[in-house]
């Protein structure tokens, strides 16, 4: 599979996310990771104050991370991604505690929310690709006893994702319907990214 990758150096992922790293590795894309040095919450707060839509916020956060790493590593093809969750007219964030997750899951119970995942590519400090994909997830009505059991089993893992769940594992029990690509739900839209990498000559077409 090494012959699929045509660049001299691996892709550089501007992220500390192991999930995004594993998505790329599972597609046999050579990749290295470098955590970006940006204040994501400050950027997000400023965008929210301007009433920017959650999908656009995801894109702007991805751009900020990718640009910072690309300026430091200008000779590398850099990708960055971000994800936001919108529910009705509200943007939700990672729960800080298990109790916060309980409140959030009760709010989402029986209703549909959207996950917006953005991915961007930079080369020599210039943005060369951007895409935002949205998945819609409908939770079933969650009973109190189930919610207690779920939070007990999941533990602190519920504080590590914006929705309070990992849909690739235990979180699957929460849902009645899911519309969207799995990689989008996991925070990195792989199909449009791979299409760009083929178009750019980074991957054998």
Image (cartoon, rainbow, N blue to C red):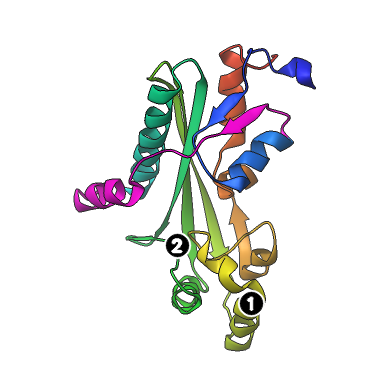
Q: Is residue 181 visible in this depiction of the protein?
A: no
Looking at the figure, which quarter contains the C terminus?
A: top right
Residue to which mark 2 is pinned: 94
Residue at image x 51%, y 74%? 109
Quadrant housing residue 93: bottom left
Residue to which mark 1 is pinned: 150
Residue at image x 56%, y 38%? 189
Where residue 118 appears, x then y in whole percent?
Answer: 46, 39
Q: In this image, 46 relative to 202: left or right?
A: left
Q: In this image, 8 relative to 122: left or right?
A: right
The stretch in magenta equals 27-52
* Helix, strand or loop at mark 1: helix
Quadrant housing residue 87: bottom left
Residue at image x 66%, y 40%? 23
Image disc number at residue 112: none
Quadrant housing residue 57: top left
Q: Specify which label sits upstream in the sequence, 2 or 1.
A: 2
């Amino acid at each position: 599979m090494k012959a699929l990758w045509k660049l001299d150096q691996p892709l550089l992922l501007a992220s500390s996310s192991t999930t995004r790293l594993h998505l790329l590795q599972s597609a046999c894309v050579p990749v290295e990771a470098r955590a970006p040095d940006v204040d994501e919450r400050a950027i997000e707060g400023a965008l929210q104050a301007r009433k920017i839509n959650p999908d656009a916020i995801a894109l702007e956060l991805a751009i900020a991370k990718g640009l910072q790493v690309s300026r430091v590593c200008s000779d590398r093809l850099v990708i960055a991604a971000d994800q936001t969750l919108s529910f009705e007219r509200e943007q939700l964030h990672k729960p800080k505690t298990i109790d916060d997750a309980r409140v959030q899951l009760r709010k989402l119970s029986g209703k549909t929310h959207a996950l917006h995942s953005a991915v961007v590519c930079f080369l020599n400090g210039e943005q060369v690709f951007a895409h935002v994909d949205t998945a819609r997830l409908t939770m079933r009505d969650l009973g109190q006893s189930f919610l207690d059991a779920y939070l007990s089993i999941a533990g602190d893992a519920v504080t590590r994702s914006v929705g309070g769940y990992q849909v690739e594992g235990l979180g699957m029990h929460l849902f009645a319907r899911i519309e969207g690509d799995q990689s989008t739900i996991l925070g990195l839209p792989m199909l449009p990214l791979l299409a760009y990498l083929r178009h750019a000559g980074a991957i054998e077409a």
